[in-house]
Image (spheres, helix red, strand yellow):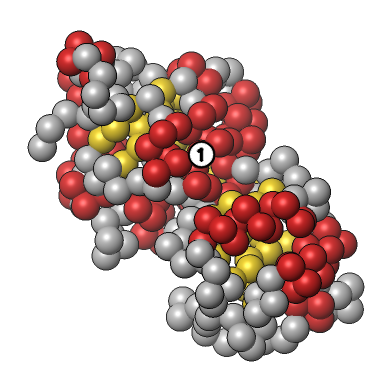
């Protein structure tokens, strides 16, 4: 495998500029980044993560996944045991089975305003509501095979104060359109409802993820780093999709996977191999080798 590089067509010395030998924190996305396409963590990556922790570098998994989908990496988080889930809406303790440490919810009135705006601007949109205790979705929404038995009802009912699980904070609102191109749907949603929430996406389909205003992987990671006295310049981040953009732009050193979305490739300072090629592990190995 070739070493991680900067943007194409830059002079050779710049392309192979070394990463900081000892950052204080590594922040990595999971799907399409750390995980292989079969949603597993390779032995090489497990070894690299453990080596980083032994070297005194904290590792944070920063993902759009809910806490209940974190079993795939829960055995590989050391030290603090924390992970940032739901695009920054929750910080959870993986040593305690995903117990929430901090929640940054989307207000239900904001979520209802988004539903109303998207129903009008993009007919055919269906919705799901990701709460701290599970996901609930509309009949037309593509079902989650990992979440059998979820309550199915119109979004307005799922967000109503009288809903059976209304005491669980809303972490994300998800919006799916069966026909629009993913990036076109994202742009449209931001234009008609961006005043009510932060919109992003991580799926290859037209599936949007909506958090509370100001809530993102970047803002929650920045809070976690500030608690540890770690500055952005001491962070190395990895990602592949638009929901990683703010985090990658905030971190002092950022890596786009070879399989990354074009916007991520354009925004990052470095490149590494694809998620199927252990791209994160390659950089950590180089980092620890100095």
Image-based side of 168 in relation to 109, left or right: left
Residue indicated by mark 1: 245
Q: How many marks?
A: 1
Q: Say above or below: 251 vs 39.
A: above
* Residue 191 visible in the displayed image: yes
The residue closer to the viewer here, 150 or 273, is 273
Spot occupied by residue 35 in the image (x, y as percentages of width and height): 31, 53
Q: Quadrant of the C terminus?
A: top left
Quarter location, residue 166: bottom right
Spot occupied by residue 147 in the image (x, y as percentages of width and height): 52, 78
| Residue at 56%, 36% in the rendered image | 246
Spot occupied by residue 75 in the image (x, y as percentages of width and height): 35, 52
Q: Say above or below: 201 vs 117.
A: above
| Residue at 18%, 15% in the rendered image | 12
Q: Say above or below: 256 vs 154.
A: above
Task: Indicate the secondary structure of the residue bearing disc 1.
Answer: helix
The residue closer to the viewer here, 205 or 83, is 205
């Amino acid at each position: 495998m070739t070493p991680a590089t900067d943007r194409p067509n830059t002079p050779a010395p710049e392309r192979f500029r070394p990463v900081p030998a000892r950052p204080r924190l590594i922040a990595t996305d999971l799907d399409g980044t750390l995980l292989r396409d079969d949603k597993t963590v390779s032995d090489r990556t497990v070894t690299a993560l453990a080596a980083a922790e032994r070297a005194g570098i904290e590792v944070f998994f920063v993902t759009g996944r809910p806490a209940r989908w974190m079993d795939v990496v829960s055995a590989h988080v050391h030290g603090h045991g924390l992970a940032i889930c739901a695009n920054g809406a929750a910080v959870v303790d993986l040593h305690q089975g995903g117990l929430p440490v901090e929640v940054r919810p989307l207000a239900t009135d904001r979520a209802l305003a988004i539903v109303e705006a998207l129903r009008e601007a993009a007919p055919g949109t269906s919705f799901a509501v990701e709460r701290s205790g599970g996901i609930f979705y509309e009949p037309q929404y593509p079902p989650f095979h990992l979440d059998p038995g979820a309550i199915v009802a119109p979004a307005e009912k799922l967000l109503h104060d009288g809903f059976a699980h209304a005491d669980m904070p809303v972490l994300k609102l998800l919006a799916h359109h069966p026909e629009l191109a993913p990036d076109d749907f994202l742009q449209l949603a931001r234009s008609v409802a961006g005043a009510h929430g932060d919109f992003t996406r991580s799926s290859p389909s037209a599936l949007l993820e909506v958090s509370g205003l100001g809530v993102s992987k970047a803002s929650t990671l920045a809070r976690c780093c500030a608690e540890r006295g770690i500055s952005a310049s001491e962070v190395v981040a990895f990602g592949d999709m638009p929901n990683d953009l703010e985090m990658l732009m905030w971190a002092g050193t950022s890596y786009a996977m070879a399989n990354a979305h074009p916007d991520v490739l354009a925004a990052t300072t470095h490149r590494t191999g694809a998620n199927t090629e252990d791209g994160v592990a390659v950089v950590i190995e180089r980092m620890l080798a100095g």
